Image: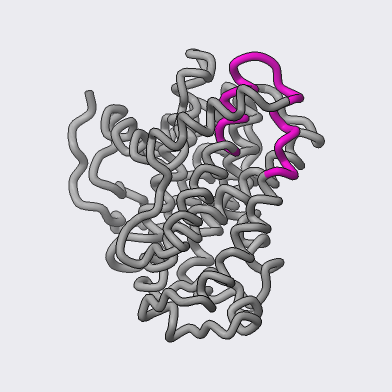
Amino acid sequence: MLAETPPQGLSDTGELLLVGASTDAQGIMAQAATENFPVASRLFPRALRPHLLAIYGFARLVDDIGDEAPGDRLSLLAAVSAQLDTIYAGATPSHVLLRRLAYTVRCFDIPRSPLDRLVQANVQDQVVDRYETFADLLAYCRLSAQPVGELVLRVAELCTPERLALSDRVCSGLQLVELWQDLGEDAAKGRIYLPAEDMRRFGYGDDDLLTGVVDDRFRRLMTFEAARTRRLLESGRALHRTIPGRLGFAIRLYAAGGSAALDDLRQRGYATFDSSAHAGRGRRWLSAARELLRT
């Protein structure tokens, strides 16, 4: 087992030294277990799980930099990009998570684009704190969420244009669910993901969001956002029908988890300012049971 890593930072040459509290497999799995949606579920074939965790480790790395790293986050993200340069030059990166990712990249001939987009999403979070339209927000999801679905499909060796289009819808829907769950937390960081045009439509202002106002305006706004998020999830639901066996069911449950989270949000009146609104295990199992009854 790898030891705990020292404090994060850059070397004198700009090389990424580390980010995050722990880079050993046990630490990654511990974080994975707390995610809203299951990472490397046992429904995935055993041989694929280490590769899914490698992808998760990379995504968690760049997200931790973008959300929590002290100092110059843009320089740290640039250092991650430099590590990707190393991987795609056929050399060995210095960071343990990037070394694991390199093995997965080479095993499945994964293109660089989805990895670059995950980094770019976190770069965007440093310079963009407001989205005018829902289309703008979906463009952000193209960077922050859709690459994850593509990477999973590539590791499963199931990536086709049809599946990728459906995966993009599901992943964007799941990203939106997490944004709606974390409205208060993100606002405290200076980021507002609710489209400005929608907030104006329902008469709910930035100051209302920043102070955690939950009233009829807010509930109407969030009912509107939740409804189109659910439609987006449903529009990608056919993805699982193109993938046989346990793997197809595993992918099916991701969308079910998103629907469960939306149900939790509705029950809470969409209030997420004082506590997280992630769906509990019981509700996720209930959604799984419902999925078994659906065609």
Compared to residue 202, the image places residue 115 above or below, namely above
Whether residue 238 is in magenta: the answer is yes
* Res 100 quadrant in image: top left
242 on left or right of 67: right
- Which one is in front, 246 or 66? 246
- Which one is in front, 185 or 124? 185
Q: Residue at x 37, y 60 (%)?
A: 67
167 on left or right of 189: right
Instruction: Please give the range of residues in magenta.
Output: 234-255
- Which one is in front, 260 or 80? 260
Compared to residue 143, the image places residue 39 above or below, namely above
Compared to residue 36, the image places residue 38 above or below, namely above
* Res 198 quadrant in image: bottom right
Q: Position of residue 110 (x, y in %)?
A: 63, 32
- Quadrant of the frame with the N terminus: top left
- Quadrant of the frame with the C terminus: top right
Compared to residue 141, the image places residue 73 above or below, namely below
Q: Residue at x 41, y 45 (%)?
A: 60
Whether residue 249 is in magenta: the answer is yes
